[in-house]
Amino acid sequence: MLVSATALLGATLGTVSGVLTLCGLSLLCKSCKKGKLERGDETDPEKAKPSILHTLTQFSVQKCTEPIQPQASLKFPKIYRPKPSVTSQEVINYKEHGAANDTSAAKLDTCNQATEREEVFSLPRQASADEMSCTSEQTGAMKTSSSILYPKLHFSISLHKESGELHISIVEADNISVDAGCEGYISGCVSVSEEQKHAQTAVHKLAAHVQWGEELVFTLPVEGTEDTDGLDGEVALSLHCCDRFSHNSTLGMMRFKLADVSMMLDADCWVDLQPPKQEVASSAGELLLSLSYLPAANRLGVVVMKARGLQSDKLKDNIDLSVKLTLKHQNAKLKKKQTRRVKHKMNPVWNEMMMLELPSELLAKSSVDLEVLNLASPGTLLPLGRCMLGLHTSGTGLQHWKQMLDNPRKQIAMWHPLYT
């Protein structure tokens, strides 16, 4: 009996303790949920309760279907353009001009405000490698035919009627382009009634600028001592160069009539010396050439196309024609090339291109010499004619070279007469 009572009491106490434990756990869960809800209300401004420090505010959120564009974090400064200034003397009413400036300034301000509202931000475009090469090619400009400087001669003329002499004072020369170590002099020639009289200065070392300070004296006929207007004659002044190999060449020359001496007396004259004209000779035929220059690659392209009208008296035994090309810088030979031989044709066709490396700064002083050759017998080459192209030549050679300089990267073809 005692044992059963003890067992019943233990079961009752266990049941009561279990119920109390369950009640405590349920209360603890409720308190945790309540705390989380209170914290959520404090962080949500829409569900927060009004208090002294937090007023009740309502926000309206509208949905938009347009895509959201990112806003730039950088802003360009305002760009102010200078106001137009009027310097003409015709402007009399300055107030109207000021009003016009104010209106233009107002327009600029409105434009700047519009750009501020739009907040337009654009990154600067970077130039590609091709564009950079093109710009560098343009800046490293190649000299055109109009920018070539020819030698200039400074001289003065005086007429001595008592002695019947014409005095030409050679003062100086400028813009001379020659190799180092070359020497030169000025020569003069007066032609009157099929009679020529020559004189020359002393030989000086040539440089870009040379001082002479010498006089050339020419004796005139008796009828020319009183008045030179009635004389039918010509005066020629030439600048000559002789290198260390004693090769004489003419750098430039100028001519004027004796009838014009009266207008030039006691005056300082500056004259551009022109390249000497090629001596008139019988043409030995014609050669068709095409020129082009590539500034980016520093290459000169010469296309030897064909020839016509070659001298037939030198083509009796054998016809084996070729063209020899020589690239020169002043008097120095830089490169030699030759075309293939064409046999048994009086009007040969080659159509061969020769590429020559030539920097743009050397174009003004360089020239191309072409010569048509015939292989008459094994080991015997007979020249039929030649032509020269460059700024120091004349005729078609000068014209063709100028067109090539004025039109880079273009093929320009022209017929050239051949001279023996």
Image (tube, rainbow, N blue to C red):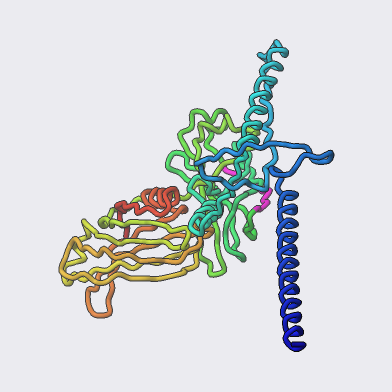
Image location (x, y in percent) of residue 2? 77, 87
Give the overall secondary structure of the magenta segment. strand
Q: Is residue 217 magenta?
A: yes
- Image position of 112 with respect to 330: above or below: above
Image location (x, y in percent) of residue 229? 51, 28
Count of picture labels: 0
Seen from the viewer's position, the closer of residues 2 and 218 is: 2
**The furthest residue to the right:** 52
Image location (x, y in percent) of residue 194? 42, 42
Q: Is residue 157 among what the camera can see? A: no
Q: Is residue 299 left or right of residue 148?
A: left
- Image position of 336 with respect to 145: above or below: below
Residues drawn in magenta: 209-218
- Taking the spot 62% from the left edge, 49% from the top edge, the residue there is 173
Q: Is residue 104 magenta?
A: no
Q: Is residue 210 among what the camera can see? A: yes
- Taking the spot 36% from the left edge, 56% from the top edge, the residue there is 291
Seen from the viewer's position, the closer of residues 274 and 280 is: 274
Seen from the viewer's position, the closer of residues 374 and 328 is: 328
Q: Is residue 263 left or right of residue 387?
A: right
Q: Quadrant of residue 285?
A: bottom left
Seen from the viewer's position, the closer of residues 117 and 403 is: 117
Q: Is residue 192 left or right of residue 385?
A: right
Indicate the quadrant containing the N terminus: top left, top right, bottom left or bottom right: bottom right
**The furthest residue to the front:** 1
Indicate the quadrant containing the C terminus: top left, top right, bottom left or bottom right: bottom left
Image location (x, y in percent) of residue 379? 27, 79
- Taking the spot 22% from the left edge, 60% from the top edge, the residue there is 311
